[in-house]
Amino acid sequence: MDKNTLVGLLLIGAIVIGFGILNGPSDEEIAEQKRLLDSIEQVDAIQKEVIEEQAKKTESSFSEAIDSKGALVVSMASDSAQMADQIQAFGAFASSSIGEAKTFVVETDLMKLTFSTKGGNIQKAVLKEYFQYAEDGEEGAELVLFDSTSNFNLNFFTRDSKNITTDELVFTTDASSQNINGDDERTVSFKLDAGADRYIEYVYKIKGNDYMIDFDVNMVEMDQIVDMRSGEVYVNWMVNAPSQEKSLKPQRDATTIFYKYKNEDVDDLGISDDREELEASMKWVSLKQQFFNTTLIADEYFDKSRAFMETITDEGETEYVKKLTIALTLPVSGSKIEKLGMSMYLGPNKYDILEGHGNELQNIINLGWGIFGWVNQFAVIPVFHFLEDFNWNYGIIILILTILLKLILMPITYKTYLSGAKMRVLKPEISEINDKHKDDAMKKQQATMALYRQTGVNPLSGCIPLLIQMPILFAMFRFFPASIELRQESFLWADDLSTYDSIYTFPAGFDIPFYGDHVSLFTILMAISIAFYTKMNSQMSMGAMAEGPMAAQMKIMTYMMPVMMLFFFNNYSSGLSYYYLLANVISIGQTVLIRKVFINEDSIRAKIEINKKKPKNQKKSGFQKRLEDMSKQQQAKIKNKK
């Protein structure tokens, strides 16, 4: 390299170094650059922190951080670990497992339904025409049939062995809050996306004036996802029944699960907590409370596989009465799933409404078994509803109903009194027989039967009319506590005829065993009326039993019965106590009227004397013949023992 070239290179290097020195950053600029780098590292650290926190909470993968100058830094990050977990848990439904649940309200003439996209369910049901019980006659809070503590879902397995429960997933919908009136019908649809045009659709058809909701589940191309080897989709429904009435115990006693097996009668689990496996295909199941119910009805039937019903009571809980749970199975036939059809009834236990929907739904109202239920169904309920049309107070309706029933039973009452009058006329002669054969029971019985046969008196003729009246007494015992018509209807001092009336409540914590924490005036009046009626009835009908052990037992019953009823009815429906009070008072009046106006004991005595003079070979009644045969058999046994 020659000298000139070397000088040139050194000159160029000096120029570059000098330019770098002249244009290099100052100490302040270097410090500022370091500060900016530190800020960027802080932002990155914040972003990382937020992403990790969001990943732990399984929320969205958006992260936010704020730089040192207050500017908003937003970045979108894909949390691969979270998505992997969702795919692992939900498979084709992973995208539906992430999202925010939204709610909206559909209001009809009868109901207010809150829907949620989380699970696509009715989250809360309110019945607009009814209110919860409130003290002092004030209007109570809205009547909640069930709330968000309850739950409904479908459960099934996928081909890749994922266990899917739909209440964990978020559905999509175009529906929004709306009102439905009169005969109008609207459809509310929810879709659960599984990708590639595959989805589950819930379709609710709601009418403005009906408690029944048509509920269909459309399974679109779901045979590609659902494991068809099991051939089943499971329905799980749990209702945490809210307390709606004045007293907790009657609610718990009435709250249970009713059900109807295919082609069989309606049955229930009973009032005690129980769990029962399904034994056959089921048409419907009803989660019944004291005056309201939520019922699920299959278009075809629910299968018995993996199905059960269960009731659980938490004695320390006062806000909720019972937890009612059902697990049902919808059979999936063939290789293609298309539609699973059901209906939901969300409403009152009102006989005519339930009867109008068919399927024997009205039988969830306990009107009594056998003849007692028939009396209520074909006599009491039609008359009661007829009287309702006059818009009278329900206390007046019960009064008129009682008078009508007593008029219908008047011939039976007359027959009962007539039998008692005959027995009273014979009392002196029966006493004479008792004295004559006091040491020989067999001869005493034979002589008594001979007297009955001679005078034409049947000692059981007064019992038969009483037996005829028994179905009505027991029918009313079932009717009043189950009648929603009496709910929150006041009369005199009773603010609710469907539950007990109280004129005095004991101090908090004080409770008389088997009686309660209050004093029911209707129950006291009823007990007094029973005491008067029982004493009057025993005096008229004792006859041959007016002496001896039977008479002593009757006297005990005369005093014990009112006391027993006082304890038994104190916590019962005041409408029922009021009815029995009226029935007893009217019966006492009828008895006095019959005795003073329609029956003359002198005439009865004269007729008996005429019968005595008739030939003694007259035909024996079947009852008298059986009694004599029994007497002869007993006498023969006594002789054989001797």
Image (spheres, rainbow, N blue to C red):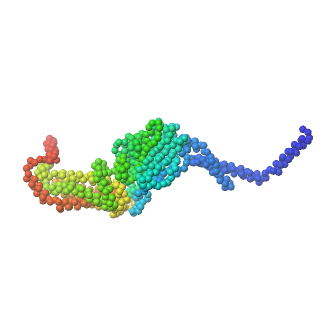
Residue placed at 36% from the left, 60% from the top?
489
Q: Which residue occupies the foreground of this view, 264 or 151?
A: 264
Q: Quadrant of residue 595?
A: bottom left
User: How many numbered dots are placed on residues in this image?
Assistant: 0
Q: Which residue occupies the foreground of this view, 206 or 412?
A: 206
Q: Quadrant of residue 298?
A: top left
Q: In this view, does 82 lie to the left or right of 156?
A: right
Q: In this view, does 178 lie to the left or right of 584?
A: right
> Image height check: is 582 above or below 237?
below
Where is residue 155 shown, x and y percent of the image?
47, 42
Residue placed at 50% from the left, 47% from the top?
190
Q: Quadrant of residue 280?
A: top left
Is the N terminus in the top left, top right, bottom left or bottom right quadrant?
top right
Q: Which residue occupies the foreground of this view, 135 or 563?
A: 135
Is the C terminus in the top left, top right, bottom left or bottom right quadrant?
top left
Residue at the extreme right of the image, as rendered: 3
Where is residue 101 shown, x and y percent of the image?
53, 50
Task: Answer whether residue 315 is visible to the viewer in this image.
Answer: no
Q: Is residue 463 left or right of residue 145?
A: left
Residue placed at 68% from the left, 55% from the top?
69
Q: Is residue 358 left or right of residue 615?
A: right
Where is residue 23 shown, x and y percent of the image?
81, 50
Task: Answer whether residue 212 is visible to the viewer in this image.
Answer: yes
Q: Which residue occupies the foreground of this view, 63 or 534?
A: 63
Residue placed at 43% from the left, 57% from the top?
142
Where is residue 394 shown, x and y percent of the image?
33, 60
